Image: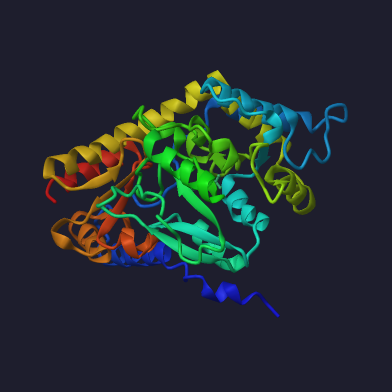
């Protein structure tokens, strides 16, 4: 018998439908240049020092004296120590032993739900949401409760007063700065979540993939800046948007030793899981991570983040001048705005495509509460983004 939960997943309709409408438009309007600011993938190249570290590591494997076989499932000591050193630069103490390195956090976030009992746990998921959290919860068969995000709470929800079915333990997915809304929690807001979790024995799964885009110093760069977080939170961080690793693949997570439930350390069972079901991330990409998180690596890849920030500003300046409500942009490569004149997300998509030949992502594709909103990304080239901004002036 197969796992029927797969049939409960929403069809992967969003980006295929975006592509279909876009292709149809291009076929019908061959002379028009369509600018795509929809997909959340980076375009700037790897920092040369990081790329060179990966090439050097590959070179080592060509020679018997430096060849390596399987590495540790949870990551080599050198890469885990690089992560711990990175936290130290933020004034946060993390033991390298608490770090697990893997091929990007998409799979870590998908797999972490293995640690929880499906009958006695309920997942709290933001709406709108990065689709993975919902999908992995559905596939495993967890009950899901949604956290409404809207203009009223500026897309930064507060903890629930009491959750339905409160006999179940709660695991909450928080993403800050958020994809798709770009909204980021301040320290005060996150403190409330940490207090909620410690009070109710809930666990926070904190997706920190866009941490390096933060410019507002009221927003924490890690949940471990918040007092009490070590006893309730697991943090995930990725090099995808920080260092352009979307195709290289590399991410890490931290599970503090203090994080225990039913007398069991979550770190222990996560390591058990990884050593059983996973054979470790590639040596080369871990050498890449080591350099990407060094002072020099970060200095170089931050130039790309600056590049994307310049793009963000081109778009937010237009929204500001038109008085359109938006979140994101300040701490994020994403700009999430209210469709003008009460338009629905797909209606606005068609309007933008037909009138301005610009493609973005309809907010409703990320959840019902995204209806009436739209997401643009700053990952395009400067020239394309400037051209799109010019066109949007006539919005
Ligand atoms: N989490 C968020 C919020 C993301 O936006 C992404 C990628 O877009 C991921 C996780 C996946 O990251 P990775 O490339 O490390 O698997």
Residue at x-position 41% and y-position 31%: 305
Image location of residue 100, percent across then percent down: 67, 39
Which of the 4 image quadrants contains residue 167? bottom right
Which of the 4 image quadrants contains residue 122? bottom right
> Does residue 55 appear anywhere in the picture?
no
Query: Compared with residue 120, is residue 283 higher up or lower down, i.e. above or below?
Result: above
Q: Nearer the viewer, residue 121 or 377?
A: 121
Residue 327 shown left or right of residue 260 in the figure: left
Residue 59 shown left or right of residue 315 in the figure: right
Image location of residue 332, percent across then percent down: 37, 39
Q: Nearer the viewer, residue 99 or 25?
A: 99
> Does residue 15 appear anywhere in the picture?
yes
Q: Which of 365 and 205 is in front in this view?
A: 205
Residue at x-position 20% and y-position 54%: 356
Image location of residue 129, percent across then percent down: 42, 56
Q: Nearer the viewer, residue 273 or 119?
A: 119
Image location of residue 104, percent across then percent down: 59, 44
Residue at x-position 39% and y-position 60%: 366
Query: Compared with residue 149, is residue 316 higher up or lower down, i.e. above or below?
Result: above
């Amino acid at each position: 018998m197969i796992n029927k939960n797969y049939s409960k997943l929403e069809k992967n309709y969003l980006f295929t439908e975006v592509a279909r409408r876009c292709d149809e438009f291009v076929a019908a309007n061959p002379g028009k240049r369509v600018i795509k600011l929809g997909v959340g993938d980076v375009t700037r190249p790897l920092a040369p020092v990081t790329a060179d570290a990966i090439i050097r590591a590959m070179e080592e494997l060509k020679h018997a004296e430096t060849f390596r076989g399987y590495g540790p499932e949870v990551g080599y000591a050198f890469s885990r120590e690089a992560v711990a050193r990175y936290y130290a630069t933020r004034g946060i103490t993390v033991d390298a032993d608490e770090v697990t390195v893997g091929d990007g956090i998409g799979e870590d976030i998908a797999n972490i739900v293995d640690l929880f009992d499906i009958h006695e746990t309920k997942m709290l998921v933001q709406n709108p949401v990065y689709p993975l959290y919902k999908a992995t919860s559905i596939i495993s068969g967890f009950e899901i409760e949604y956290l409404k995000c809207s203009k009223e709470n500026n897309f930064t929800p507060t903890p629930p007063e009491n959750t339905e079915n409160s006999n179940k333990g709660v695991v909450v997915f928080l993403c800050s700065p958020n994809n798709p809304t770009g909204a980021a929690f301040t320290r005060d807001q996150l403190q409330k979540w940490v207090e909620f979790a410690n009070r109710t024995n809930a666990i926070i799964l904190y997706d920190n993939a866009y941490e390096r885009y933060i410019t507002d110093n009221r927003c924490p760069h890690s949940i471990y800046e918040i007092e009490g977080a070590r006893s309730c939170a697991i943090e995930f961080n990725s090099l995808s948007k920080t260092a352009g690793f979307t195709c290289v693949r590399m991410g890490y997570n931290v599970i503090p030793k203090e994080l225990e439930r039913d007398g069991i350390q979550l770190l222990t069972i996560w390591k058990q899981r990884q050593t059983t079901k996973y054979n470790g991330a590639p040596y080369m990409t871990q050498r890449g991570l080591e350099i990407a998180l060094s002072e020099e690596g970060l200095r170089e890849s931050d130039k790309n983040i600056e590049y994307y920030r310049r793009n963000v500003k081109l778009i937010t300046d237009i929204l500001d001048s038109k008085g359109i409500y938006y979140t994101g942009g300040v701490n994020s490569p994403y700009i999430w705005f209210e469709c003008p004149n009460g338009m629905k997300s797909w209606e606005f998509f068609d309007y933008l495509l037909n009138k301005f030949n610009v493609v973005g992502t309809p907010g409703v594709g990320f959840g019902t509460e995204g209806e009436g909103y739209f997401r643009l990304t700053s990952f395009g080239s400067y020239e394309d983004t400037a051209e799109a901004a010019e066109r949007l002036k006539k919005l």
